[in-house]
Image: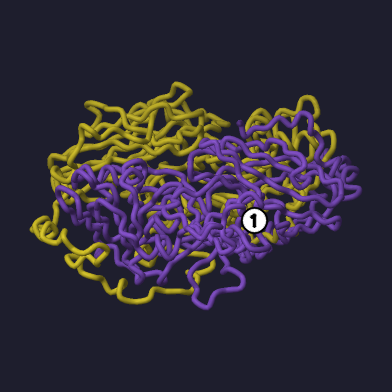
Chain colours: A yellow, B purple
Amino acid sequence: MSGQRDFSNRRNFLKNSIAITAGVGATLTAKTSLAQNTKAEFLEVDPWTKTQGSTFINPPYGLPSRYEKSVVRVLPSPAPTFLTGSRTPLQNLHGIITPNGLVFERHHAGVPDINPDHHQLVIHGMVDKPLILTMEDIVRFPSESRIYFLECSGNSAAELKKASGKTAQEIHGLLSCCEWTGVRLSTIFQESGIQPGALWALAEGADGAAMTRSIPMKKMMDDALLVYAQNGEMLRAEQGYPLRLFLPGYEGNMSIKWLRRIKLGAEPWQTREETSAYTDLRADGKALQFTFAMDVKSVITQPSGMMKLKSKGFYEISGIAWSGKGGIKKVEVSTNGGKSWDVATLQEPVLDKSLVRFRYPWIWDGTPGVLMSRAFDSNGDIQPSMEALLKDKSPNTFYHNNAIQPWRVAASGEITNGR
Amino acid sequence: MSGQRDFSNRRNFLKNSIAITAGVGATLTAKTSLAQNTKAEFLEVDPWTKTQGSTFINPPYGLPSRYEKSVVRVLPSPAPTFLTGSRTPLQNLHGIITPNGLVFERHHAGVPDINPDHHQLVIHGMVDKPLILTMEDIVRFPSESRIYFLECSGNSAAELKKASGKTAQEIHGLLSCCEWTGVRLSTIFQESGIQPGALWALAEGADGAAMTRSIPMKKMMDDALLVYAQNGEMLRAEQGYPLRLFLPGYEGNMSIKWLRRIKLGAEPWQTREETSAYTDLRADGKALQFTFAMDVKSVITQPSGMMKLKSKGFYEISGIAWSGKGGIKKVEVSTNGGKSWDVATLQEPVLDKSLVRFRYPWIWDGTPGVLMSRAFDSNGDIQPSMEALLKDKSPNTFYHNNAIQPWRVAASGEITNGR
């Protein structure tokens, strides 16, 4: 699974695909005797080379190039009347890291404006020694930095009924991946102690919704983090500044943002967010509760919906795969709607509960087709087709759509949602 | 080298160090019979919990919390009359990723404003088939994503003469680490072919300086990338938008930004930037040329200059280590000015030519001391003391300072540059 692929049998991408400006070769050959380090006279010298560039800091906290202004988070389409989230432009991203400015948002009562000097975390309930911790206290504990994906359990939900979105962002954009830094909950519980029988923890946010979820203590002790930083810098406000819970691989809403309180108890609390919401309705009318881990999933991001292949020839199919139940073991790609599958290359590092970038070389012959990817995880799970996923679900089910995403390629090169 | 450290013999950080608000324990105990999911009445309910938060997208391209406005790139102090760079606030960062808004800048004629639709890259000189590639051509090639550090060879330079900077940012902030995505130069040269005897490549930028460097073809074929994205999104303007060369581990100026031309030849071109600049003056009056790889180095970032330890007790010493010659094998920390050293924990993933985060638990007893770190790399090199580093150098040497950074801890807890 090396990222350095052997292209020895796929030489000459250009011959197959990329048109060189007509006559350029001849022009260049005639110029190769140019004096060393002379400007290449066959290249027009652009205006930006003839002038001094901007010399101020650009700015002290930098922003993307003005030519990238369309690469932003967007609301779902159609936008809800109450704006509660925004989506990551997956089709514009490369690698596995989501830059902080493009990490998806989901909040239940807006983004609170918390002064970190006044923020406190309480640890109480079935502990030996209740604690109140300030942010200054928390950052003094030993920390860890880990690259993990974060996905809303309602990601891709509208697709369960019918084709709803056009782009990877619209359909799957409640998904991001960052390097998170924080303190292990297991370290905090060394301080508070845990009373016998304390099998669940209640986490509560300081937002207007006082968002609450019940979390098994096993998860809290295994790998849960009190996160204060993302991609190096302090958490963004919409990501829970100054403190959030982070439960690697679990549905996003459980990683309570603006965390103010953790209470230990013997039973789950049956909060709104684990009874009326975030449960999975089955065909028999019963609902699954506490379906914590996000299932194995993948999506091709390049090319994807609303893009257009401009000519026949070589393309690198690229996408992301992830599993809340462990590591990605393999990703397969089909370019013929699932008739045959071939193994994609996984870009290292391949980390547990992180996005994994996969790549697959493809020569488009100009005929219609359907592109698909399916991921395999270390838990032994395989990403299902939509048909298989829906078999036991209610028509009103909403969460945990990890079905294969088909992208239809037209003879014109236009790519559309193949749901 | 697991990031999950065994703290079994270091339990109870709080007992040693972190003061719990007086009386809180008793208050909490009295309240543990609160009805499930009731608000914790012993915690003042802050104003942000009583109101709806902001519900617009925050904004479509997000920015840090307003409470973090001091965490920005800064100019060197004193600032030069011609502003050519800015520094990363290393002491405010966690993990290994530098967020794009805080990646250091260094440019020789300002930042050009390049329209990617008009940008072209020429491959010429001793090739079989000269190429002109548009950005659209380039992104169609197979790509790779890699986490690599980037360091200016003049980083920490002022310290060679005397203590000059106060903070990790001021002293060492010409250093960042991103996930870079691009096309291997070896893939591009499969298209152009390479003529026998072509041992060097000239890379030229499209900025007003037409920045040029000679690069051995061995490096170009080994791991050099044509980079178009950083931390997921397209390159920032000050990082070379829309295209830069990236030479993993090599001094930053060689990773030519705004790349417009690569010419292959038999000999180096002896450009300004490899003769009058970026050479290393020795004590005997001769200068070393083509000292490409950045040497093994580390710096403690927390705690570091201008911070203050507020009380005795537990602190996690944390910092970053890197080597342009391979991987970090080990980092040692001293809290007594180098009299004794102990091994720090390296946070996984430990990647070649990337920043590596190290952590070391420390109990401060309130006495003065000097904190130091020294890194060991896979090339067999050990980070030297300043005394050892300067032994054969001219007093006027400027580049490649990889000496150990001492931070002096006063009895007051104040941390200062111990150079």
Q: Residue furthest front?
A: B284
What residue lies at 8% left-to-right and 57% top-to-bottom?
Answer: A26
What residue lies at 86% left-to-right and 46% top-to-bottom?
Answer: B365
Q: Position of residue A333 (x, y in %)?
A: 29, 32
Residue A239 appears anywhere in the view: yes
| The quadrant where residue B168 appears | bottom right
- Quadrant holding the N terminus of chain A: top left
* Type of amino acid at the residue the image marks with label 1: Gln
Q: Position of residue A341 (x, y in %)?
A: 26, 27
Return the residue at label 1: B91
Residue B103 appears anywhere in the view: no
Q: Position of residue A184 (x, y in %)?
A: 68, 38
Residue A221 to residue B417: above or below: above
Label 1 Cα neighbours within 10 Å, binned few <14 / some 14-19 / many ≥20: many
* Viewer-nearest residue: A107 or A192: A192
Q: Residue furthest top?
A: A380
| The quadrant where residue B15 appears | top right
* Viewer-nearest residue: B65 or A346: A346
What residue lies at 19% left-to-right and 67% top-to-bottom?
Answer: A41
Left or right? Give the position of B82 relative to A227.
left
* Viewer-nearest residue: B355 or B213: B213
Q: Position of residue A255 (x, y in %)?
A: 60, 42
Q: Could you say whether the residue bearing mark 1 is in a helix, strand or loop? A: helix
What residue lies at 19% left-to-right and 47% top-to-bottom?
Answer: B192
- Quadrant holding the C terminus of chain A: top left
Q: How many marks?
A: 1
Left or right? Give the position of A171 relative to A242.
left
Callout 1: residue from which chain?
Answer: B
* Viewer-nearest residue: A92 or A279: A92
